């Protein structure tokens, strides 16, 4: 199975396409325009089998300066580079730029191929070799072999094959256990099959019939068929070039640079935090907020650079940078990227993506720089612990941590178990994890807010669980909030009844003024059968209104007073703003109504007026309240006792 991808690089017309054709027999220039102009425009692909039997994939990239962006797309997923330098031409501008790009993309293995060897004598070949050695000094190619090669005579073919076999054996396999991501570099249609997308898998693996999603865009389908270099396969993993048949997605909906992944597993973003290397070949310092072209995988967009640890970057320096992108792109942590200047269009640097971000960086946030440095240099254990810790009051699932760090879910599971044993993280009931010290701080904040609530609301039993969350903890993960309330209740540090949260030692206490008001309210509501709110409030002076409302709310909560509202009345009606009924009065009314119905079978509003001596509105309001509490049941314009109504009557009245 194909495990390694080798890619060409080098100046235009230095024989890259001829080199691949001489090795594989495949002409990677497939477009009419490419054949007519005699140069590559887009990356081409060809399979190859080494003498050892190992299969590799070749990517042939364009060398013209106008198509460098296509070159970047082509080499983004390669493992081994073949730098082609024409022996009769030597080092040229795109030779140097391609070396920079390969170095910035983190390519570790390569070979230099001195092409067109049949056109030069021994002296010129030696001069070309010396020039190449000077150009590749201090790059990943510094110790690479330089092989004479002629596509015309096949000179050097055997030596190149042996060198490729040796280099391929040194390649460390890509992360097949990570989150699946396939940057799309080509999309086309096949009659009878529909849309097909291709690319080199950057991470993870895909199986036939997997549910997939195209990012950004939220296009969903399933992988109907998979092919690796024309061979049907049931699965493909990181490092392999694969074609995926997605029949339900229209070709017009796909653009180069999108990323194929599993459903809800990848993240598209407008902000990227990264390590940036400014090429030493540049001649000017790079200022903050510089606009550039950002290339990663198969995608590209304009961006603004925001330096996180300095104001100016000088050639050869490395810095932490936040890229604010014009278009949303989809990538993974530790993906490589290239930055090109907008004018003149040239490669100026690149580096490693560290994280996808939601917020713009602020200089006072020094912990962010520390976290990014840890992502770059820390162990997997340190990275996962820091990711959980810096996530604050939000819990994380294992899959989310994998997407955030590109560490395999299996490794993360083992790390979390270790952190849990050390008492550093808490695993919630649904498998989500949160840093223990963060959770403890939140628990203390909950207790603090409850103490403040009791101090400001001495007549309330406690705060509604949801009101407390929305008022003070709306940014907190609801899973963590519920877990902490449950833990605080187990430890008897809070009391929860019917969704109301309070401290266990809290007791309601009234001030002398509130006690005076309470006595007055009780007298007014017992002296009157039903007392409208306006009349009740007018019995107190203006200075007492605030305290009166507090006492009324308290009496209503404990059930001593009942609040009745009739919003369907005319605006000026006395009951429009509601009325109060004392619980003892209600008990008397219920006795009167029960006796009347038992004697007469039912009761009307007119009957209620005679019983209570109130007007029609008050009588209607009282009967409506009795209906609400299931004491009476409406039957036409009259009422009967609820408990005496049979099943048929209840159904007929819609109850």
Image (cartoon, grey):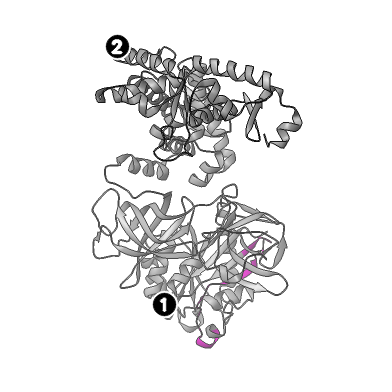
Q: Residue at x 44, y 70 (%)?
A: 69
Query: In this orientation, does residue 503 appear?
Result: no
* Residue 346, placed above or below residue 481: below
Left or right, 571 with respect to 220, comes to left
Query: In this orientation, does residue 271 appear?
Result: yes
**Residue 316 located within the stretch drawn in magenta:** no
Left or right, 227 with respect to 90, comes to right
Q: Secondary structure at mark 1?
A: helix
Whole-percent x, y for residue 321 in the image: 33, 53
Q: Secondary structure at mark 2?
A: helix
* Residue 376, placed above or below residue 623: below
Whole-percent x, y for residue 378 in the image: 42, 40
Quarter of the figure that contains the C terminus = top right
Closer to us: 530 or 167 = 530
**Residue 54 located within the stretch drawn in magenta:** yes
**C-alpha distance separating marks 2 and 1:** 86 Å
Disc 1 target residue = 66
Q: Which residues are magenta?
A: 35-56
Q: Residue at x 68, y 70 (%)?
A: 194
Q: Residue at x 71, y 70 (%)?
A: 193
* Residue 559, placed above or below residue 576: above
Q: Residue at x 51, y 38 (%)?
A: 396
Closer to us: 578 or 82 = 578
Whole-percent x, y for residue 219 in the image: 58, 60
């Amino acid at each position: 199975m194909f495990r390694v991808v080798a890619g060409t690089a080098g100046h235009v017309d230095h024989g890259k396409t001829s080199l691949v054709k001489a090795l594989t027999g495949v002409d990677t220039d497939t477009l009419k325009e490419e054949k007519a102009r005699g140069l590559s425009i887009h990356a081409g692909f060809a399979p190859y089998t080494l003498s050892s039997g190992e299969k590799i994939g070749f990517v042939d990239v364009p060398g013209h300066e106008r198509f460098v962006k296509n070159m970047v797309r082509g080499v983004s997923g390669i493992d081994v580079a073949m730098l082609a330098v024409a022996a009769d031409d030597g080092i040229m501008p795109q030779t140097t730029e391609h070396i920079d790009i390969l170095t910035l993309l983190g390519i570790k293995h390569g070979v230099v191929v001195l092409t067109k060897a049949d056109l030069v004598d021994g002296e010129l070949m030696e001069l070309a070799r010396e020039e190449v050695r000077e150009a590749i000094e201090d790059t990943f190619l510094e110790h690479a072999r330089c092989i004479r090669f002629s596509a015309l005579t096949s000179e050097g073919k055997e030596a190149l094959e042996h060198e490729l076999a040796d280099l391929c054996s040194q390649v460390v396999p890509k992360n097949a256990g990570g989150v699946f991501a396939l940057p799309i570099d080509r999309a086309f249609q096949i009659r009878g099959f529909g849309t097909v997308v291709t690319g080199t898998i950057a991470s993870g693996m895909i199986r036939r019939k997997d549910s997939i999603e195209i990012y950004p865009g939220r296009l969903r389908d399933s992988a109907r068929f998979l092919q690796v270099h024309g061979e049907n396969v049931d699965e493909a993993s990181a490092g392999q070039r694969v074609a995926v048949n997605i029949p339900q997605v229209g070709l017009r909906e796909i653009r180069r640079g999108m990323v194929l992944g599993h459903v809800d597993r990848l993240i598209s973003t407008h902000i990227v935090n990264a390590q940036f290397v400014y090429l030493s070949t540049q001649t000017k310092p790079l200022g903050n907020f510089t606009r550039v072209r950002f290339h990663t995988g198969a995608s590209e967009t304009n961006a603004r650079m925001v330096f996180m640890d300095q104001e100016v970057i000088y050639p050869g320096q490395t810095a932490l940078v936040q890229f604010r992108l014009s278009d949303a792109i989809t990538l993974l942590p530790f993906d490589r990227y290239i930055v090109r200047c907008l004018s003149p269009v040239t490669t100026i640097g690149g580096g490693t993506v560290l994280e996808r971000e939601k917020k713009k960086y602020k200089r006072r946030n020094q912990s962010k720089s520390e976290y990014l440095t840890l992502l770059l240099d820390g162990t997997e254990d340190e990275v996962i612990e820091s990711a959980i810790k810096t996530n604050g009051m939000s819990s994380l699932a294992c899959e989310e941590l994998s997407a955030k760090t590109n560490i395999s879910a299996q490794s993360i599971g083992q790390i979390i178990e270790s952190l849990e044993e050390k008492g550093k993280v808490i695993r919630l009931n649904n498998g989500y994890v949160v840093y223990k010290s963060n959770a403890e701080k939140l628990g203390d904040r909950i207790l603090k807010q409850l103490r403040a609530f009791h101090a400001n609301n001495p007549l309330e039993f406690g705060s509604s669980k949801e009101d407390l969350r929305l008022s003070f903890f709306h940014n907190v993960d609801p899973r963590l909030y519920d877990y902490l309330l449950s833990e605080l209740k187990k430890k008897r540090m809070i009391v929860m009844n019917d969704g109301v949260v309070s401290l266990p030692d809290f007791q309601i206490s009234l001030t002398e003024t509130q006690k005076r008001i309470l006595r007055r309210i009780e007298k007014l509501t017992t002296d009157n059968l039903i007392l409208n709110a306006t009349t009740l409030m007018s019995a107190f002076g203006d200075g007492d209104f605030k305290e009166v409302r507090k006492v009324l709310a308290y009496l209503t909560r404990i059930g001593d007073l009942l609040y009745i509202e009739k919003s369907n009345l005319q605006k000026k009606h006395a009951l429009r703003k509601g009325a109060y009924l004392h619980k003892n009065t209600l008990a008397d009314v219920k006795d009167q109504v029960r006796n009347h119905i038992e004697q007469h079978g039912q009761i009307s509003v007119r009957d209620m007026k005679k019983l209570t001596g109130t007007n029609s509105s008050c009588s209607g309001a009282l009967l409506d309240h009795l209906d609400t509490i299931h004491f009476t049941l409406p039957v036409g314009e009259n009422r009967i006792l609820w408990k005496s109504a049979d099943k048929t009557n209840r159904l007929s009245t819609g109850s």
